Image (cartoon, rainbow, N blue to C red):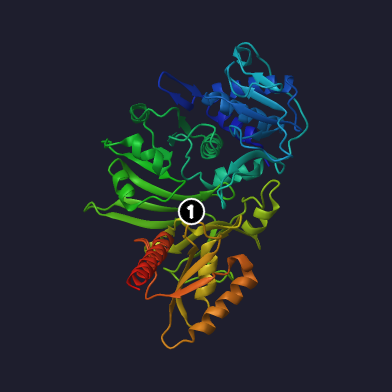
């Protein structure tokens, strides 16, 4: 199996004059970037970087990022994503902290300044020799908030990164794709896409100047919904750029329509550091200007299941799980989270989702579904699912007790089938919650209702449920005060 650096060098040898990075004031070809990478590898080796090293980089210079990544890949050294103070696991001890400005926050006892002495002009020569790099050894260390909102680190081998790059080769087409992004160049999403561009021979358009992107002929733009809104503002691109992919949070229908004013195709991406780009909801405009959206599964398996792992029908909420040949199998030094997220060969993302029309993947609002009870986090949908699995219960939603100064506990609203034994159904549901999730996740108050409050996308509105409880409580207090005054 080739290393990342060998895969890149093949592209550079075959297409030395192809542009690797486009800048507003110039360009860097694959041949030039290859020479820069060789110079960086030489300097990194001279600084004692080996396959036993773990390096970290703080820079705002894209070519420094790419040359350092390639140098680390050649030497077999671990590359740890710059994390701006997030604690790293014990086994990720950083041996070399590289930075490109003297005032960098990376300046510590083991910090090394990347200066002009790292350039090919001042550091000519061949690649340093070393033992054959093991492409199955962990190489790229990335952090993700993932399933709980708490940063966790995952490790990717060079084989996994190459496999992920090949999986998106239809988007990063050598000599055709010109990739631009609003993402910071040291972010996880940018690093993975930049590596895919290098491995596949595509061009990276540097910076976030949209006028330069247009002049450079950008064909693919990447960013989050929160970034794209202010980035475009009220501006509409004419002519439209070919493609924008958005990730990191749900893309509303309104935002998708707005983006289609400036892009021919909008991809709403579902992906994860644990498993790469997995699924896209692809939106385009038909001849009448009507938005059409369809789901596009890549080379991964995706299932939406209930608490017992059984697939749920189309349109019904369930837990999202995925698997492919290049996903990680756990987190670094986080066995508790790992046990809940990786089960039976599947990665459970922590998302609640449903299949919609045209194979569209509908991701619900995760933040509203993660409930903290006494310090223990649980996906509230798991409780909903258990209640709905009980005979006599048609629908259910749980939510945290919203009353001020109350203990951490769950409440639940339940829609009963006509004629069911309500007491028996509730006790059966509580028993199964206790058995599967523990005592703290058993709703103390269960109230029958005519219907469950839901958002326009069909997901349960737990905030509305909590507000209803507060309203009922306020009415009861007011009635009590009125009776007391009347007495």
| Residue plotted at (63% across, 11% down) | 122
* Residue lying furthest left: 288
Measured as percent of width and height from the top left, residue 309 is found at: 58, 69
Q: Which residue is mark 1?
A: 367
Element carrying mark 1:
helix
Number of marks in picture: 1
Q: In front here: 461 or 24?
A: 461
Measured as percent of width and height from the top left, residue 358 is found at: 38, 63
Indicate whether 125 appears above or below 340: above
Indicate whether 246 appears above or below 408: above
Q: In front here: 132 or 25?
A: 25
Pointer 1 local density, CA inside 10 Å: few below 14, some 14–19, many at least 20 = few
Measured as percent of width and height from the top left, residue 431 is found at: 61, 76
Q: In front here: 427 or 406?
A: 406
| Residue plotted at (49% across, 73% down) | 446
Whether residue 391 can be seen here: no
């Amino acid at each position: 199996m080739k290393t990342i650096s060998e895969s890149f060098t093949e592209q550079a040898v075959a297409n030395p004059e192809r542009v690797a990075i486009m800048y507003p004031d110039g360009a860097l070809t694959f041949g030039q970037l290859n020479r820069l990478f060789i110079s960086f590898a030489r300097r990194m080796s001279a600084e004692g970087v080996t396959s036993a090293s773990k390096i970290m980089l703080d820079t705002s210079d894209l070519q420094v990022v790419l040359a350092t990544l390639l140098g680390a890949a050649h030497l077999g050294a671990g590359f740890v994503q710059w994390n701006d103070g997030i604690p790293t696991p014990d086994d990720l001890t950083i041996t070399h902290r590289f930075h490109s400005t003297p005032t960098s926050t990376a300046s510590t006892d083991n910090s090394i300044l990347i200066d002009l002495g790292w350039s090919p002009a001042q550091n000519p020569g061949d690649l340093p020799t070393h033992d054959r790099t093991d492409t199955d050894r962990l190489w790229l260390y990335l952090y993700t908030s993932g399933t709980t909102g708490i940063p966790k680190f995952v490790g990717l081998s060079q084989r996994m990164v190459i496999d992920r790059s090949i999986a998106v080769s239809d988007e990063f087409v050598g000599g055709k794709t010109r990739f631009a992004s609003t993402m910071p160049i040291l972010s996880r999403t940018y690093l993975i896409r930049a590596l895919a561009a290098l491995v596949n021979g595509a061009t990276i358009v540097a910076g976030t100047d949209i006028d330069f992107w247009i002049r450079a002929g950008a064909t693919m733009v990447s960013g989050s919904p929160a970034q794209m809104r202010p980035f475009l503002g009220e501006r509409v691109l004419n002519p439209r750029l070919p493609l924008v992919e958005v990730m990191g949070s749900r893309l509303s229908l309104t935002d998708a329509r707005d983006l289609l004013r400036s892009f021919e195709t909008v991809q709403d991406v579902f992906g994860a550091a644990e498993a790469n780009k997995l699924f896209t909801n692809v939106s385009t405009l038909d001849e009448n200007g009507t938005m059409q959206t369809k789901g596009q599964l890549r080379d991964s398996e995706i299932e939406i299941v209930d608490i017992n792992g059984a697939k749920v029908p189309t349109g019904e909420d369930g837990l999202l799980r995925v698997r492919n040949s290049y996903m990680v199998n756990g987190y670094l030094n986080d066995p508790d989270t790992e046990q809940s997220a990786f089960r039976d060969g599947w990665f459970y993302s922590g998302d609640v989702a449903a299949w919609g029309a045209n194979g569209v993947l509908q991701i619900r609002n995760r933040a509203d579904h993660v409930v903290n009870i006494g310090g223990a986090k649980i996906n509230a949908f798991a409780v909903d699912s258990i209640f709905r699995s009980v005979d006599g219960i048609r629908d259910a939603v749980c939510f945290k007790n919203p009353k001020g100064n109350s203990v951490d506990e769950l409440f639940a609203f339940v829609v009963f089938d006509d004629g069911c034994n309500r007491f028996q159904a509730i006790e059966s549901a509580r028993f199964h919650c206790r058995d599967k999730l523990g005592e703290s996740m058993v709703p103390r108050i269960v109230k029958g209702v005519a219907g469950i409050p839901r958002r326009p996308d069909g997901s349960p509105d737990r905030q509305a449920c909590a507000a209803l409880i507060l309203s009922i409580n306020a009415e009861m207090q007011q009635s009590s005060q009125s009776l007391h005054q009347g007495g």
